[in-house]
Image: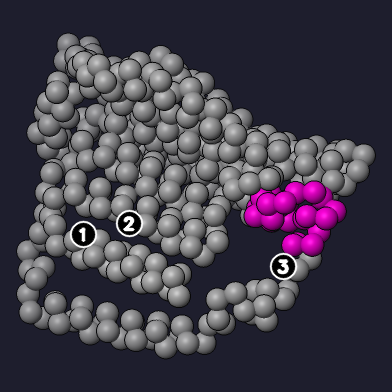
Amino acid sequence: MTGLMVNICLLALLVIIVVMVMRTHRLFAVVVLSGAYSLICAVVFVNLDAVDVAFTEAAVGAGISTVLFLAALAVLPANEKQPPGAHTLTSNLAALVIVVIVGGLLIHAAFDLPALGDPNAPAQVHVAPRYLVESDEVLNIPNVVTTVLASYRGFDTLGETIVVFTAGLGVFVLLCGATRTARHTATKDERQGSGRDEG
Amino acid sequence: MKDNVILRVAAKILFAPIIVFGLYVQFHGDYGPGGGFQAGVIIAAAFILHALVFGLDAGRRLFPLWLNIWLLAAGVLIYGGVGVASMGLNGLFLDYNVLAATQATGQHIGILLVEFGVGLTVTTVMLLLFHAFAGFEPRDFEGGDSVLDKGRSRDDE
């Protein structure tokens, strides 16, 4: 009963934050609110006993993402730009119809999901029992999440690491411009005596 | 923010404990919540805090760009290297059982090394992203001048 009350309060907070994000046009407020959203999501995950996911959400979603967004905000205007014709009656009506249809479909689909913690759910009867028993008793690794992530699903995690690596490298090449053309332009700029001074 | 004495002292006091906590999360992932991804972000947060308070140049002196790029690749190479090493010991790719005499020890060693590779890559990617965004100079974009002025006035504060 207490768990239900906590869940309702947390979900209500999430809805309030989403509405606030939609209402405000100041990007700084949006960034801070999305950080708060991630933090409440982390609490929801703790409530579901998914501590590892909560940890990641708090560190990545609420921590680093907020800092990266703030760093990106430094080169962006402070307010969100409204595209022309963004809030006409037709566009609002079309959006409302799409949201209602998709939301209805999702709620309909949610009724077919197994109950939370159902031992007969398809996800619990395939390989999960073997992981739970083997990780603790044979391998002496109590945190099954780590065993699944790094050992049983080692290929997936290798792929994830390579994705993170590639994404970081891509952003670096795009933003820091370590390309042949950019270097050529930079040397030309210096020759013309317009080298920028460092603040 | 360099002139604010409270921020400066707090950042200096917090820097080492954040890294120790990151290492705890990194190497305690077998027994409690945590692992390479979370630890990488936490350790990166310590360096980002330092760069935010003492300036981007000081951050880059502490953790130079060349080291950042090298460690970025090293993380992925450590992960892949564990897989290749287990192949060299007549196992399958990423089969940790052959890394030690018993299955349990082999899995422990394999998971520890693999998580270390993940943590290294995540730390360096986060730092690279932060410095790429925060040190971004929009010289190649149209209308970049007004944006640049805004960035400068922010640095002067």
Task: Give the chain of mark 1.
Answer: A
**CA–CA distance between discs 3 and 2?**
31 Å
The local crowd at label 2, few if under 14, some if 14 to 19, many if 20 or more residues have their Cα within 10 Å, is many
Q: Position of residue B119 (x, y in %)?
A: 57, 37
Left or right of residue B51: residue B24: right
Looking at this view, name the residue that lies furthest to the right: B101
Residue at the spot x=40%, y=59% of the render?
A41
Amino acid found under the numbered disc labelled 3 = Ala
Q: Which mark is residue A155?
A: none
Q: Secondary structure at mark 1?
A: helix
Q: Which mark is residue A37?
A: 2
Q: Which residues are magenta?
A: A131-155
Q: Is residue A184 visible?
A: no
Residue denoted by label 3? A128
Q: Position of residue A121 (x, y in %)?
A: 64, 80
Lower sequence index among marks 3 and 2: 2
Q: Main secondary structure of the magenta part?
A: helix
Amino acid found under the numbered disc labelled 1 = Val
* Rendered position, A5 above or below B69: below
**CA–CA distance between discs 3 and 1?**
39 Å
Q: Position of residue A187 (x, y in %)?
A: 29, 17
**Labels 3 & 1 near each other (Cβ < 8 A):** no
Residue denoted by label 1? A21
Q: Position of residue A172 (x, y in %)?
A: 40, 34
